[in-house]
Image: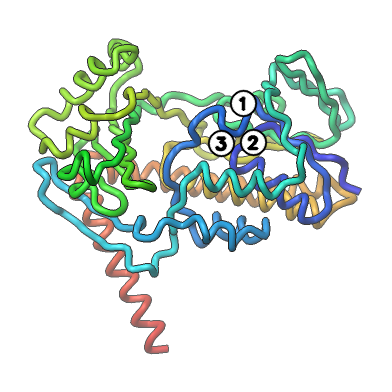
Amino acid sequence: MTPHVTIIGAGLGGLTLARVLHVHGIPATVYEAESAPTARAQGGMLDIHDYNGQPALRAAGLTDAFRALVLEGRQAIRILDRDGSTLFDKADDGTGGRPEVQRGELRQILLDSLPAGTVRWGHRVSNARALGDGRHEVTFANGSTVATNLLVGADGAWSRVRPLLSDATPEYTGRAFVETYLYDSDSRHPATAKAVGGGSLFVLAPGKGIQAHRERGGTLHTYVVLTEPLDWFAAVDFTDAAAAAARIAREFDGWAPELTALITDGDTAPTLRPVYALPIGHRWDRVPGVTLLGDAAHLSAPNGEGANLALYDGAELGEALAAHPDDIETALTTYEQAMFPRATEAAADGTRLHDFLFGDDAPHSLVTAFIEDEREERKKQEERQNS
């Protein structure tokens, strides 16, 4: 029978794997570096796609719980010019295939679906090594160790499990996000709240932009995007919140004040998020007893697919192990041979998306892409109605 599965990382992918294994009666333990589920904020909104994220949650038996988290109206998309004028505006009519939820809430339903004790908090990996015959040993910073016949690295961009399979390391893409929040925006920042609208906002120019999303309770979550070398950001004093906000805002001089307020009036200190990626097409030769999922396997520039792919990886790996309980290697081979091409395609699509967002023709390239998508969707609807 499939042995006890050791999973490193209690993100969406690792927890989905643990849940799907539990559904199939396969025991697993998840080791997580953070000290508790609430040790840090879990990011913002996620659009969960009907072709990967949602099927993964279905395999986990959590569709109803997921649906209860959906924030209605958040699939709306708005593109504004830097002067605040509208270039594209699409309301959420309830028919879209990418409902929005908060990452932290989605993670919590996964945690709640697992037996008590499945996740071991406060276990930061310091080393992982091969023992031979498909077995591996993981050493944690707290001094404890675990030996396992089946090790899964779901531990993100800087995975400590990845070196067992690959020499690849993430590289800076040349672009970074600066994260800010505005709370109670409708009452405290009405002009900015109106500009953002009910869902996602894009205000773009070649090499830079302001992206914001309306979260629960009138919170506006913003990612300011700049294409600059790491040395440029190192010269910004992010320990001085006001000075950092002012320096970042200077890159958007002349933009509408209701837009730059997302930077200058933030209720949290600006947080730098450099964007790293693994090589597109990253893969490895089969190594007995170990594999990767999510960002550990295929970190790429943010493109709306990262969380969905992690969910799908976790579900697909769990299903493969359930389908081959007496043959771990067949299960891992089946999973990896399907995962590699879909991850490569998603990363390539992400590169094209960033060209739309921040290339020389921004924002008009993105507007054109959305208009073409709407035209194609209308065509498909007409064909369905006439068939």
Q: Sequence-wise, which precedes: disc 2 or disc 1?
A: 2
Q: Residue furthest front?
A: 187
Q: Sequence-wise, which precedes: disc 2 or disc 3?
A: 2
Is residue 375 left or right of 134 when viewed as pictured?
Answer: left
**Measured from the top left, where is residue 286 in percent x and y?**
74, 38
Is residue 146 left or right of 200 when viewed as pictured?
Answer: right
Please tell me the numbered disc located at residue 295.
Answer: 3
**Measured from the top left, where is residue 44 in percent x and y?**
42, 41
Q: Give the vertical position of 70 relative to 276 (above or below).
A: below
Q: Please tell me which residue lies in front, 193 or 341.
A: 193
Mark 3 or 1: the one toward you: 1
Residue 372 is at least partly visible in this image: yes
Label 2: which residue? Answer: 10
Point 14% across, 45% down: residue: 81
Cα separation between marks 2 and 3: 13 Å
Please tell me the numbered disc located at residue 373.
Answer: none
Q: Sequence-wise, which precedes: disc 3 or disc 1?
A: 1
Residue 290 is at least partly visible in this image: no
Label 1: which residue? Answer: 34
Three-letter code, disc 3: Asp
| Disc 2 + disc 1, Cβ < 8 Å | yes
Three-letter code, disc 2: Ala
Secondary structure under tag 2 reads: loop
Q: Give the vertical position of 16 relative to 164 (above or below).
A: below
